[in-house]
Image (cartoon, grey):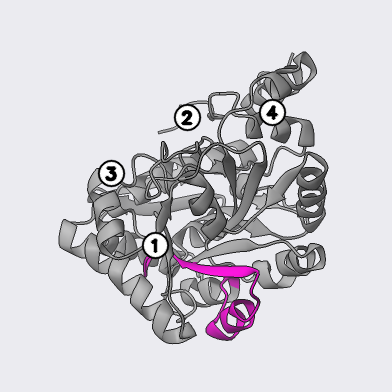
């Protein structure tokens, strides 16, 4: 049997589906599905961010399946209303997209609008302004191109041989984890150093991948689309001092409201995992005037106010999995551990 963690996780979910757990264990009143990129499948040998991508066809299949499973696909405002009401017999699903990627307009929106379903888009405002730094994309491009990478880590010049695909994946995981641990100013220095060494145009790459304000104005004109905030620069909030974190949260809201001339009521913690935000950031989101704030902590939303509106769980769909049976099990609230990569022995 394969020891690949993605395969093993998929197998567990498939077995759970056929055991009937997807029907026997149905908890909560609503689920929020989280996606990032929606674009045609690529054949590149090195795709470290593949888990964050789905195809337009899979998005179409997901919408059809949710309808077939008798889920009402609703807005984030409706999720918030249902979360404080008495339990309902109906099941609700909310579709959300993080990152503010251009392919939301080019690949996702045609599918979503054809089906007439609402969705929420969480936008870090530096990116439509053209000044955001998508360091994770630049890191991917540099490693994909090279067979040897050198850079300064903790004041020491480090060298990595990455001729094989497995070595590229291990280095990406290692450097991404390291960069996420840095303060924003140090992260910016580190990624710009890497991009200078290996001729990656960070500014152009970030602009190319991101929605601009014209795209967002077009989306905002559709009553089925909710534009929400994800700070300005998409930092790891736990790496910031409190004043800087509060400024990121408030300014993201203010910039989007000014640009789109509408109230921005909802918020997403950048990256969203438990290491990237804490209780004090929940308080900040409330104080900033947001009705809700979403994380990437997996789970379903319970009725009667049992789930905090400023710490809403979301189910982040792993784009390497294509099984709708697996999705149905996850939506039912059956707990499964997240897929973890094997530990690197390189570094």
The reply to whether the C-beta atoms of the residues labelled 1 and 4 are less than 8 Å apart is: no
Residue under circle 3? 278
Residue under circle 2? 344
Q: Secondary structure at mark 1?
A: loop
Mark 2 or 4: the one toward you: 4
Q: Residue at x 80, y 18 (%)?
A: 18
Magenta highlight range? 209-233
Structural distance between the alpha carbons of marks 2 and 4: 30 Å
Query: Can residue 11 be seen in the rendering of this structure?
Result: no
Structural distance between the alpha carbons of marks 1 and 2: 27 Å
Instruction: Give residue 135's position: percent from left, percent from top.
Output: 45, 61
Q: Is residue 218 magenta?
A: yes
Whichever of callouts 4 and 3 sits on the residue coming sooner in the sequence is 3
Residue under circle 4? 329
Q: Residue at x 40, y 43 (%)?
A: 177
Which quarter of the image is occupied by the N terminus? top right
Query: Can residue 243 be seen in the rendering of this structure?
Result: yes
Q: Residue at x 41, y 42 (%)?
A: 273
Instruction: Give residue 42's position: percent from left, percent from top.
Output: 76, 55
Q: Secondary structure at mark 3?
A: loop
Mark 1 or 4: the one toward you: 4
> How many discs mark residues in the rendered view?
4
Q: Secondary structure at mark 2?
A: loop
Whichever of callouts 1 and 2 sits on the residue coming sooner in the sequence is 1
Q: Is residue 324 magenta?
A: no
Whichever of callouts 1 and 4 sits on the residue coming sooner in the sequence is 1
Residue under circle 1? 234
Foreground residue among 78 and 53: 78
């Amino acid at each position: 049997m394969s020891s690949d963690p993605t395969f093993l996780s998929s197998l567990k979910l498939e077995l759970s589906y056929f055991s009937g757990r997807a029907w026997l264990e149905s908890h909560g009143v609503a689920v929020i599905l989280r996606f990032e990129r929606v674009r045609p499948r690529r054949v590149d040998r090195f795709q470290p961010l593949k888990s964050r991508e789905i195809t337009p066809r899979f998005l179409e299949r997901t919408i059809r399946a949710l309808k077939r499973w008798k889920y009402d696909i609703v807005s984030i405002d409706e999720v918030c209303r249902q979360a404080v009401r008495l339990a309902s017999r109906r099941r609700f699903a909310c579709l959300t997209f993080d990152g503010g990627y251009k392919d939301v307009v080019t690949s996702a929106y045609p599918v979503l609008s054809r089906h007439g379903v609402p969705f929420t888009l969480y936008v870090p405002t530096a990116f439509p302004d053209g000044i955001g730094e998508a360091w994770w994309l630049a890191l991917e491009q540099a490693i994909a191109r090279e067979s040897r990478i050198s850079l300064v880590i903790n004041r020491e010049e480090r060298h990595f041989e990455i001729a094989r695909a497995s070595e590229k994946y291990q280095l990406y995981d290692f450097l991404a984890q390291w960069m996420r641990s840095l303060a924003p100013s140090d992260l910016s220095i580190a990624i710009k150093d890497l991009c200078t060494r290996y001729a990656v145009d960070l500014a152009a790459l970030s602009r190319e991948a991101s929605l601009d304000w014209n795209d967002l104005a077009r989306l905002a004109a559709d009553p089925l689309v909710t534009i929400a905030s994800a700070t300005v620069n998409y930092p790891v909030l736990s790496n910031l001092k409190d004043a800087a974190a509060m400024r990121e949260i408030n300014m993201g809201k203010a910039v989007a409201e000014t640009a789109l001339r509408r109230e921005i009521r909802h918020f997403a913690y950048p990256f969203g995992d438990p290491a990237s935000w804490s209780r004090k950031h929940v308080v900040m989101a409330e104080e900033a005037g947001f009705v809700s704030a979403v994380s990437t902590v997996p789970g379903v939303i319970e009725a009667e106010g049992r789930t905090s509106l400023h710490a809403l769980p979301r189910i982040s769909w792993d784009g390497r999995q294509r099984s709708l049976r697996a999705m149905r099990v996850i939506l039912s609230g059956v707990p499964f551990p997240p897929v973890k990569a094997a530990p690197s022995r390189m570094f």
